[in-house]
Image (cartoon, grey):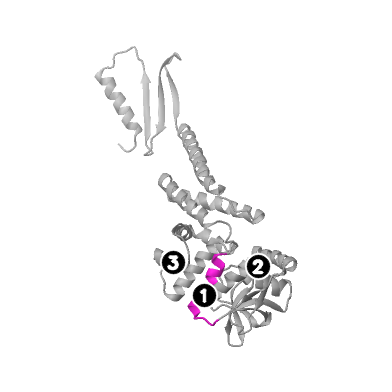
Amino acid sequence: MAKKPLIVDFDDPFEMEQAFINAAGTGKVALGSSSTENHIVDLPVELIHFSEHQPRIITDRVLQDVETLATSITTNGQIYPIVVIKKEEKYELVGGEMRFRAVRDVLKHKTIRAIIRDDQSKEKTALISLIDNLHRSNLSDFELVNAIQKHCDEFGDTLQNIEFITQKYQLDQSKYFRLMSFYKLPNYIKEDLKTHPKAISGATAQQLLTELNKLVLKFNHQRVDDATFTIWKKYLNEFLETNRPSKKFIYEIEKTLMFKETVNKKNQKIESNALVNKMVLKNKDGLKFGSLKMEKNLNGKTVLNIRTSLNIELSQEKLEKLEAFLSSLDESL
């Protein structure tokens, strides 16, 4: 016996969406007859415009994902509808931007399957758009935290209120702290993430921040920052070539610092040895009777070490002459 199609006719659009997702692949979804609001309908793509609250950063990689999604829609159909709200005679897209781009820009379809939600307040619209993307794995953590920050700034919320943020945006506290780690990273990393948001996750950002805080206690801040900059740029280039995020670059920072520390110590030793002059003391017959070593100390002064063995008695007069001679070598005396 053939399955009856699911009649979608809910007052709550969130409940309706969940029913659609549960029904996908198991039966058909049919429209109720009472109204188009909160139902799945075919809308002309020309009547739909993007929301200003869309959290996704559009990069070349995202556009490649849109191409892939378009191929999937061609093969399997549009399984999930986009979500819109009615704005006068047109509609504002609040969920499903990549599906919309795939259908409109790649497949060039004139219509798209959509859920029309009741008109919402500006804040509610922004929140719907954000939460719709929050639960889709292809939105990066960096895009998410920026969208939350933008939403907070616009509607007077505070990002530091952990309980409020985690409840409003449906985050657990561990996720919250991972996202907050982005704000404490060096500025050049945050700037790069604006164009390559998937380079690192919130977990990687948190681990990187912990490692940098540890290294600053061991090495000076400037050396840590210089090493981090070099390693980060190298990693970013690798990520752009492979599109594979990795945490390995974090461990390279300390290795680089340790290597430079070893090289610096060797160079200091070589430089110190170069400043040491040694001389063998010989008498008029060419026989060794001592040695003289001259080197620079840390203050830049010359240290003169004389070791000698003489078969004579040093009279007071000779000691005074020796003292006078040594004093004459120091121009400051």
The amino acid marked with disc number 2 is Ala
* Residue at screen point 66% across, 76% down: 30
Disc with the residue nearer the chain's start (1 vs 3): 1
Q: State the residue position of label 3.
A: 167
Q: Is residue 144 magenta?
A: no
Quick check: marks 2 and 1 in contact, CB under 8 Å? no
Labelled disc at residue 24: 2
Majority secondary structure of the magenta segment? helix
Quarter the C terminus occupies? top left
Q: Which residues are magenta?
A: 118-135
Task: Name which residue type carries label 3.
Answer: Gln
Residue 21 in the image: state x and y as whole percent: 61, 68
- Name the residue furthest front: 1
Location of residue 253 with respect to 3 vertically, above or below: above
Do labels 1 and 3 touch, CB within 8 Å?
no
Q: Which residue is mark 1?
A: 126
